[in-house]
Image: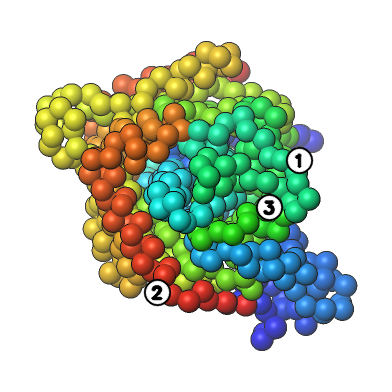
Amino acid sequence: MADVPINAPQHCPGTGSTEAGKSSACQGCPNQSICASGTMSGPDPAIEEIKEKLSSVKHKILVLSGKGGVGKSTFSAHLAHGLAQDESKEVALLDVDICGPSIPKMMGLEGEQVHQSGSGWSPVYVEDNLAVMSVGFLLSSPDDAVIWRGPKKNGMIKQFLRDVDWGEVDYLIIDTPPGTSDEHLSVVQYLSVAGIDGAVIITTPQEVSLQDVRKEINFCHKVKLPIIGVVENMSGFICPKCKNESQIFPPTTGGAEKMCTDLNVSLLGKVPLDPNIGKSCDTGKSFFSEIPDSPATLSYRTIIQRIQDYCEKKKVTCFS
Amino acid sequence: MERSQDGGNLSGVQHIILVLSGKGGVGKSTISTEIALALRHAGKKVGILDVDLCGPSIPRMLNAQSKDVHQCDSGWVPVYVDQEKSISLMSIGFLLEHPDDAVVWRGPKKNALIKQFASDVAWGDLDFLIVDTPPGTSDEHIATVDALRPFNPMGALLVTTPQAVSVGDVRRELTFCKKTGLRVIGIVENMSGYVCPHCTECTNIFSKGGGEELARLSGVPFLGCVPLDPLLSQSLEQGKDFVQEFPNSAAYPAISSIARQILDMASPRS
């Protein structure tokens, strides 16, 4: 079936099929109503609008992991902090984890609200050159649960991409929830014309995590999303008292290093466990300023430099 | 009679426990697995239903990743982990052709499979069915709670790690339980404290006490802290029975105490 879009949900009957928009796989797909109407007028008009809106964004980076709790948000937050240390760069951070938004807390922005302006939603600013957007800013209390099914989450993501007034931005970092489902498909679909530089994939060393991350890498291949590289987080722990290293999450199958060799993706670096990282995330501070000399911070800096080099070298791919 | 016909495949299940957390990677699958093993050692028949469709971890944790699901007259036969058939298991992991296949599904498709998991698995008679869920409060959770509501689940076990970022997501999960009328059995704080194997100094890598504090503030029972224990991660990696292999380890007393509390809560009902 040649008319199945590359980023369609699994078992998509194809846009030209008589089942288009009607099969069970179509439910929740943003193009469902278009397919069902039979006009075949092309993809969601929002995709073009998003391209227009994001034309002022130079680089777009997705932070992904099949596994939860491996440090996606910690990494996204500190990639943003790290890039924003260069005052000539404008950085934006978008949190599309609709059910578990951690970014507001990590950036010290809990309780902040989003304002509406003529040109859309205004993001919340941490520094002059660091803007943040998250569903957390739209909730009235920290206890509020967003109990939404897929289509509603997709609508929110569309709004985040189309209606947020980012202005001129050098780097847009998109933090995602774990898995390979609605949020991920939607981001990739909506940005199919605007283009994404690539994805950074986060994992921890143990096989239970790697097995989910392999699925995420397969997802990237399926939707033709370039992979910038893999970061191994929580890799070894150095006891603050005796300075000996031990493995809390033992890499029984060779860790991220072996997986990267096997799957031919690059390993951007390993970040050791440091209790101060968790602490600075809980208090909403950047550990670049809190613990500038920790091995974890130094490792972060190398990884960020690699990502920067990648983006500057590479032209943005369109993969529609 | 009427009830058992309607009840179908879940009518022989005494107690259904959902393991939930707003946050990923806090140890839902670990706690599900270890509680199942501990209940098994207490002589109970246990089933585990893994509804994490995008990242199923349970098969590997019980060393069953190469097994297949078979069909019988009353539906799917779950995978049995041991000879005595005291732990049975159902997961999407058994239905994939290749273990690295990504399940790129949107909500409605996930809901359909969960409904099928709830109605078409021939569990037989079980003392406990433990339902392991993915992180969040979305399709899988709504579908699971809807599908299990007719069977009056015993409640939800919430897992968190101690740091504020994780506790924040678990607060949202508590709201989910309240809104859907699901009883909260209690909160488990996982990964609290790590004892250095070289100098036995205890470091609170992900801080300490967040789960207990949350339980106190929201008035739900606190079931205990499970420390970070490399022996535990190792036995999960190799699919070994931690409860049997390492009775002297740091995490063991915590796990068996949680299992005991669950047994105590369950006994007046049976």
Q: Quadrant of residue A261?
A: bottom left
Q: Position of residue A308 (x, y in %)?
A: 39, 63
Q: Which residue is mark 1?
A: B6
- Say which residue appears at 49% left-offset and 68% top-offset: A197
Number of residue marks = 3
Q: Which residue is mark 3?
A: A164
Q: Position of residue A237 (x, y in %)?
A: 23, 39
Q: Check disc 2: other Cα within 10 Å, few if <14, some if 14-19, many if 20+.
A: few
Q: Amino acid at mark 3?
A: Val
Q: In the picture, which quadrant includes the N terminus of chain A?
A: bottom right
Q: Position of residue A9 (x, y in %)?
A: 65, 67
Q: Which residue is mark 2?
A: A313
Regarding residue B20, the answer to whether it shows in the image is no
Measured Cα–Cα span from mark 1 to mark 3: 50 Å
Viewer-closest of B186 and A72: A72
Q: Amino acid at mark 1?
A: Asp
Q: Position of residue B22 (x, y in %)?
A: 55, 36
